[in-house]
Image (spheres, rainbow, N blue to C red):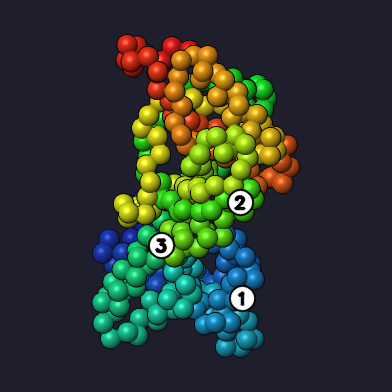
Amino acid sequence: MAHARQALFEPDCFFSTAEKGRAAYLMEHSMPEKRYSIGEMSEICNISKKTLRYYDSIGIITPCRHDFNNYRYYTKDALLSVLVLKYYKQMGFTLNEMRAFFEGKIPNVYKEISSSFQNKIKELTLAKQEIEHQHASVCGWYDLVHEAEMVIENDIHEISVKYVEPVHLLSLDHTYDNDIKSAIISIDFTNHVENMQNKIVGPVIINFSSFEDRMKVLPQPVRLMQRTLLPCPEEACAVFGGTMMATCYHIGHIDRIGDVYRRIYHWADQHDYALSKDSYERYVTDYWTTGNCEQHVTEVMVAIHRRSAATGLGCNN
């Protein structure tokens, strides 16, 4: 009897399980929708109030207004739209592009979205290439600065012999009139690169046609050379390297580089090497890097071979 009396006072005892489920559903969906203030939206979505107000001003995500007190509030749909918008923004779409996606008023919405995505992929591919070019340029310049730093720090002046790997470099003939700065920062060469829609990287290299004239610091025909980021036509390039070379660093103003040439000349004679008629100067750091000429580092490079045929490929110092 006690259990029976208790059951009479418990409302649930009059409803089946199915009826209870329907009642719970009706209660849940009859409850007013959750409303969010701009402060709550800002905190939940991790976005500034200023940005939310801007989105409202351009009509992308707008708050609702209460019928009685004109109070502005956001719905859950608006909250979720912020997250979708942030994802489109992550992919690089503009607000105008996002607006078209959000409104969904385009007749063939998926065709339009697909076209927008294809255009975005092309745009990002070009941006990626540009960043890769910038990265290569900065890394190349950093390597040269580090090399110069090591040369100066260790006061490297010794002449050495090494094999230089062959490389195709963009080249341009030039008449050198002892204005080394205008040769290194060449207007003609810069225009030449730009006309080819290319970009340069790495050190400037100048091929002097006469070792002896360069030793005497005399004017002469030269060839300006530098590596490019994009491939160049073969006829626009010259091969640098592919042979044994005597090399020596010069630290300081380029006007004194004749001393290095004289050292190489006497060294080659003492070690039974024949020097090539031309020479190369590889500008590790120069006017592109710093206006302090005493901190410039130049590598003088000359192709060599043994005078004594009997020694073959030997390259003993």
CA gap between label 1 and label 2 equals 64 Å
Q: Does the rendering let one see residue 30?
A: no
Between discs 3 and 1, the one toward the N terminus: 1
- Vertical relation: 187 (above or below) 302: below
Image-based side of 249 in relation to 20, left or right: right
Image-based side of 254 in relation to 20, left or right: right
* Residue 24: mark in rendering: none
Residue at the (40%, 22%) spot, across then down = 305
| Circle 1/circle 2 CB separation < 8 Å | no
* Residue 53: mark in rendering: 1
Point out residue 234 in the picture as x, y percentages from the top left corner: 31, 52
Badge 3 marks a residue whose secondary structure is: loop
Q: Nearer the viewer, residue 181 or 61?
A: 181
Residue at the (40%, 18%) spot, across then down = 307
Circle 3: is it few (<14), some (14-19), or many (20+) Cα within 10 Å?
few
Point out residue 40 in the picture as x, y percentages from the top left corner: 60, 65
Mark 2 against mark 3, which lies toward the viewer? 2
